[in-house]
Image (spheres, grey):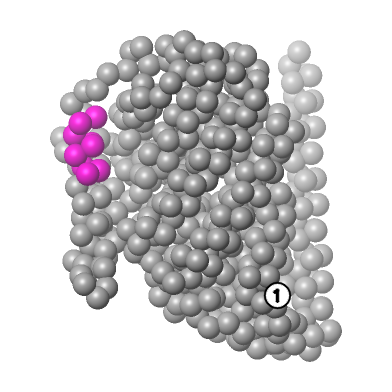
Amino acid sequence: MKLRLKSRTRKLRIKTRNQVFIGVLVAFFFAALAWGLSLFYYQASWQVSAFAGILAFLIVLWTNGALPLGMVSLLPIVLFPAFGILDIKSATSNYANPIIFLFLGGFMIATAVEKIGLHKVIAKMLLSHFPKTPKGIITAFGVASVALGSTLSNSTVALLLVPIALSITQEPKLKTRFLLAVAFGASISGITTPIGTPPNLIFIGFLQTVGLGTISFVGWILLMLPLSICMLYAMIQILSFGLNKEEINIDAFGGVSVNFEHKRLLVFLAILLGILVLNSPIKPIYSGLGFNENLILLSFGLLMFIPKIGFLTWEDSRSIPYEINFLFGAGFCVAMAISKIQLGEAFGSVLGFFGTLPLILFVVCVCFFVLLLTMFISSTALSAILLSVLYASTKEVLEPQLQSLIMLIATICVGFSFLLPFSTPPNAIVANRGGVKVWDMFRFGFILSLCGIALIIIFGMLYWRWFL
């Protein structure tokens, strides 16, 4: 028995080594191809060609998972200085971008919510206010996702609600719909606040890095909340189509009750939201408090660790996904490199094509292109890559306001991919933990993705365009 176990372990190690070797080899191949095309076909400079090769290398490794995400995301610190694209000080400064500390603060608060079970209290409260029919439960999960998403990341929302969805029924059809409501609702909730999903933070940090301004915390909510509500309504109608109206017995929250710790954390969250609202300027009427929002979120996050005041011990910080911080830094590093080497000018003959398209047609092309890419690349890695490409391709043909609009539309499209388990973290969570079939996710997700694209285009052209 021991010999068989050793043999299987040895075969698994060999298989893993082979996957890593092949994955890295493929990355080197595409890096050499991008470098060669840039240098010899497009007659780009050595610096631009080297950047194209490095970017292709990073994209392939982010996509195939041959090496750990955090390790790949740290490679720009080594590769950009080595090829003369950025100096070491400039490269490393991107990994201390203030947006990273906004994410850290938000995740500390999310850990406190999860630790004391506040999410169960919120879910129980919401489920008790909706009919105990399939459509009512789908609505409750959608509303719960958006409510929890105001302070938690979309992946955390999915992790917290999946066990609740599984406990309601074992009937396959209903269980699938409830789990999809959790996954899709979590993705919808992810766009509602800046800390809801990593692509939001990557976009805001990217704007700051390339000098296109920024969006305040409350300003982001004002932009996205109407879209979230519309998408939530569309999701409820799609997932509840064809279901009966019989009542379902729910006993998942029998032992859940509100205690003093829950109330205390709710007070903290209310104070935080109040400060963020007061801090957000409403020009030209009100200029705001003038505090840095990144420091506000980080301060409240650290407050969670103060004994007898907060809710966490330092050991709880181990659950924070620090590799995502490195991915943020890599995205900002790529953005700084593009600004320095003027990539748009280097490929002006190619990228000038976008200037010939009407704006609405260009937006439609971007939306469907992003939807296609999310079927092959994870949302976080895709946003880090896509923003850099869009910025370079539109820098010479669009004014800054429209550049910001195009990149914002692409960012929201990345978060609105409902097609496959790989597309977004909530999809992966319900597929792995809930056993949702790929075909079920695809057929419902495809319809919802089309609704999302239509709504994004409408909001982008009629609302966001004048807000930015």
Q: Which residue is mark 1?
A: 52
In-image side of 452 versus 34 (left or right): left
In-image side of 281 versus 215 (left or right): left
In depth, the one of 129 and 288 nearer the eye is: 129
413 drawn magenta: no
SS category of the residue bearing label 1: helix
Q: Magenta region: which residues?
A: 262-270
Q: Residue at x 67, y 64 (%)?
A: 364
- Name above or below for residue 206 compared with residue 394: above
Q: Residue at x 57, y 35 (%)?
A: 237
Image quadrant where residue 223 sits: bottom left
Q: Name, please, the residue furthest toward the left.
A: 308
- Which quadrant of the figure contains the N terminus? top right
Q: Main secondary structure of the magenta part?
A: helix
Q: Residue at x 75, y 56 (%)?
A: 24
**Residue type indicated by callout 1:** Ala
In depth, the one of 370 and 205 nearer the eye is: 370
